[in-house]
Image (cartoon, rainbow, N blue to C red):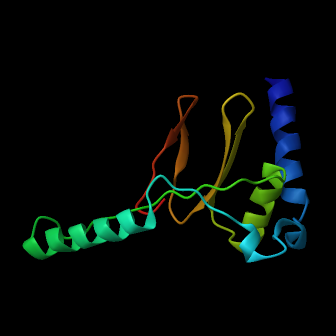
Amino acid sequence: YDGAEKALSALASCISSTEASLDTLQPSSIDDITFDSPFSKSSFVEAVGSIKEHIHEGDAFQVVLSRALTTTFSEESLRLYRALRHVNPSPYMFYIDHPEICTLVGSSPEILVQVKDQTAVLYPIAGT
């Protein structure tokens, strides 16, 4: 317990003590960033049209359609978290680093990650 408490305290200190240098996290040009998505732009536009028809027909009154975009990030993920905290200080930010699975970094206007009974539970909201 004491060891875990010290490790968590050290991590909290590390996260809160260092300002991210935003200049080093920005690409030299917006053209340097490329995104991949399994949902093409034309398919997305087509889906929007279909949703609008369903809303007009009364099948739904609100639909959240999202398009996942992925890109590579070569910096340390903790630096991304710090930069995100600097530009968008949300009370519901999270940084989860699991070296064998993945790293999740996020900022949400509503609670997204909660720990219950030693289990991290994700509650994605519309648009997340």
**Residue 25 shown left or right of residue 121 in the figure:** right
Dividing the image into 4 quarters, which one contains the N terminus? top right
Between 42 and 116, the one lying in front of the other is: 42
52 to 19, vertically: above or below: below
From the viewer's perspective, is residue 21 above or below residue 16?
below
Q: Residue at x 84, y 53 (%)?
A: 75
Report whether 95 appears left or right of 110.
Answer: right
Measured as percent of width and height from the top left, residue 6 is found at 87, 33
In the image, residue 31 sits, relative to residue 37, either above or below, namely below
Answer with left or right where residue 98 lies relative to residue 78: left
Q: On the image, which quarter does residue 57 sit in?
A: bottom left
Q: Is 21 left, or right, of 99 in this rendering? A: right
Residue beneath the point at 90% across and 67% down: 24
Report x, y in % for residue 19.
89, 65
- Residue 96: percent from the left, percent from the top? 68, 42
Residue 128 lies, in percent from the top left, at 49, 59
In the foreground, 33 or 97: 33
